[in-house]
Image (cartoon, rainbow, N blue to C red):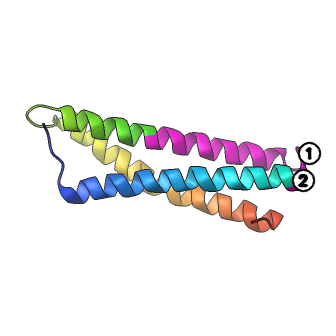
Amino acid sequence: MAQLPEEITEIFNQLKQQALNVIHSETKVELSLVDSFEETEQILPYLNEMKNISEEAIRTYSQLSTLQLQIAQAQPLASPAMLELLNRAINKSQARIPTWIRSIEEVNQEWNIL
């Protein structure tokens, strides 16, 4: 079984938790918007934005989990290609998650919810 350094495993786990937090926050904002303003034309773009964020966060969580499992199953070591995928996934996630969080916060502020 290929084993990642503990530092990389921690990064993976933190990124997956952050993706879950984004999904939770997005869902909360989406429900608050619908409860407060119903699905009017005015909020539809925001609802679409929130849904897109959630879908991206779900894909990110899934990708990280799948990659982590594949590396754990690799024998005897993870291939260079798999390690490259790992680096790309980490870099992409580290770049995207703060953007999602900012977008959710902006919608919260703009609509004065939560």
> Dot 1 corresponds to which residue?
40
Residue drawn at (63%, 56%) of the image? 25
Q: Quadrant of the N terminus?
A: top left
In-image side of 64 versus 42 (left or right):
left
Q: Which range of residues does the magenta coloring cover? A: 36-61
Res 40 → quadrant: top right
Image quadrant where residue 28 sits: bottom right
Q: CA distance from mark 1 to mark 2?
A: 7 Å
Residue 96 visible from this viewpoint: no
**Left or right: residue 85 compared with residue 79:** right
- Disc 2 crowd rating (10 Å Cα; few below 14, some 14-19, many 20+) is few
Q: Main secondary structure of the magenta part?
A: helix
Quadrant that contains the C terminus: bottom right
Q: Which mark is residue 111?
A: none
Residue 50 in sight: yes
* Element on which disc 1 rests: loop
Does residue 103 lie above or below 43 as drawn?
below
Residue 109, above or below 12: below
> What kind of element bears circle 2?
helix
Name the residue tied to disc 2: 37
Q: Position of residue 32 (x, y in %)?
A: 78, 55
Q: Residue at x 53, y 45 (%)?
A: 57
Residue 103, percent from left and from top: 65, 58
Asked whether 45 or 108 is in front, the reply is: 108
Q: Is residue 62 magenta?
A: no
48 sits left or right of 63 in the view:
right
> Contact, CB < 8 Å: mark 1 with mark 2?
yes
**Which residue type carries mark 1?**
Thr
Discs 1/2, front: 2
Task: Identify the residue at image location x=38%, y=58%.
Answer: 14
Amino acid marked by disc 2: Phe
